[in-house]
Amino acid sequence: MKTNFFSALVLISASHFLTAAPIAPLGKNGHALNLDFEDGSLNDWKVEGNAFEGQPIKDDTVAKRNGPGGTSSHQGQYWIGGYEIGGDDLQGSLTSVPFKVTQRWASFLIAGGNWEKTRVELVDFETGKAFFKVSGEQSENLRPVVVDLEKQLGQEIFIRIVDEQQGGWGHINFDDFKFFAERPKFPNEIDPKKQAVPEADTVLYEGLSPDDAVAKMTVPPGFKATLFAGEPDVKQPIAFAIDHRGRLWVAEAYTYPKRAPEGEGKDRIIVFEDTDGDGKFNKRTVFMEGLNLVSGIELGFGGVYVGAAPYLMFIPIADGDEPKPAGKPEILLDGWDFARDTHETLNSFKWGPDGWLYGCHGVFCPSLVGKPGATESERQWMDAGIWRYHPTKKVFEVFAEGTSNPWGFDFDEHGQLFEEACVIPHLFHMIQGGRYQRQGGEHFAINVDEVARNEKFRDKASRKPIF
């Protein structure tokens, strides 16, 4: 029985390679085109925009930054990794030179965002029209796509790799375009016909005014939606909180996605108040301007807690009917990362039933958080998870660690914390001290005491464990 099973495995593997012999497309001078990037350059490609500057990528940088379980699955040494150099916010395209279709079948590797704006196109050279499009699957793991080119046999086509998307998964990965005489079979290939790719600019009711947008909302029976504030009275809102007087405090994020030089921040906090109870504001006050990369806000203890990486700040509020600062912002903590994915940094502030201020933090912007002036050994590593800060003891700690980019959480009637995240499974019940599935990276020590204990068993010079 064991012998038969082994033989079956050998036959399956052999049949795969026998029917999948790749053929490199040729240029007009008869040379094999650089459609697998194995010469380490972008020869045979035209670059537009800045999304693909510095490409191709050598070796598996995905595994290096994502840790165990993360991989690029590229072919050979070189590949196109849209995130690896410029992140998600750059835009542009790569266009190959035209080449003749000499075989019916082709395949290539693709990964990245599943947006219509992050795609690979095959284009008819004569008409300039794309006859095939496919996007990624919200993964860095390159997977094969097979294309039937029967209608294009003998004609010239070219490849266009497009990145017009910014923000989460706003990038595309690509590698290894090849022809085949027979249809190749891959166990993990993407079927473009089954992709649910969001179309660009097809948002229902897009472009409506604030009043018209509210009128189009649907809500459960017994509920009603009204417009409290809209443009131009509020712009770029990224976080809000409600005080004990029912006033709405809104952080407007004009600096995002990149932190401005010190002193040049353009973010601000504005306060809306409904004094006659009709569900619409009739009083608007600018509380503070000149903030930089604001991402979270909460009220309490006589002031406003503001997240603006690299800082968690506290701005005291003067008593009275006119909301205004009672002093300059106090830096409670620093070390929050702002050089990587700024949409992942400290956010979603909320008071817990235990009196601590809770917040979220994403997976790909690791921070070393501590009081201003603290040494590295006195700081706490923080990436994916939920953190909390005690307002009177001035203590920061990780509540639970893991998930991906948590962008919201709440407590139930029993004080249990539930968090929602992106990419991986989306809803988590978070228990203090717990470690949860991660999108990438490794689990870490969740308090400074753990770090100190671990350091006792590490050689200070080599940083290797001592046993």
Image (cartoon, helix red, strand yellow):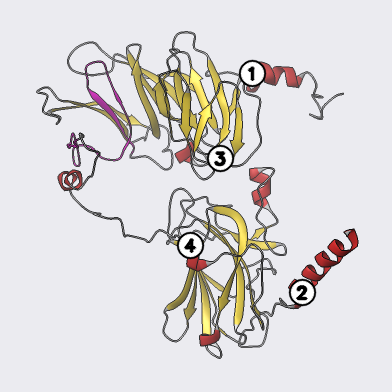
Mark linked to residue 195: 4
Q: Position of residue 256 (x, y in %)?
A: 39, 41
Q: Amino acid at mark 2?
A: Ser
Q: Cβ–Cβ below 8 Å for labels 2 and 1?
A: no
Sequence-earlier tag: 2 or 1: 2
In the image, 49 versus 149, the foreground residue is 149
Task: Looking at this view, name the residue that lies furthest to the top.
Answer: 392
Please tell me whether mark 3 sits on a helix, a strand or a loop: loop
Q: Cβ–Cβ below 8 Å for labels 4 and 1?
A: no
Q: Main secondary structure of the magenta part?
A: loop
Mark linked to residue 15: 2
Q: Is residue 305 visible?
A: yes
Q: Amino acid at mark 4?
A: Gln
Q: CA distance from mark 2 to mark 1?
A: 55 Å
Sequence-earlier tag: 1 or 3: 3
Q: Position of residue 405 (x, y in %)?
A: 50, 38
Look at discs 2 and 1 and give the one toward the viewer: 2
Q: Amino acid at mark 3?
A: Phe
Start-end of magenta stretch: 224-253
Mark linked to residue 364: 3
Residue that mark 1 sits on: 448
* Crowding near the residue tagged with mark 4, few <14, some 14–19, many ≥20 C-alpha atoms within 10 Å: few
Residue at image point 79% right, 24% down: 460
* Crowding near the residue tagged with mark 1, few <14, some 14–19, many ≥20 C-alpha atoms within 10 Å: some
Name the quadrant containing residue 306: top left
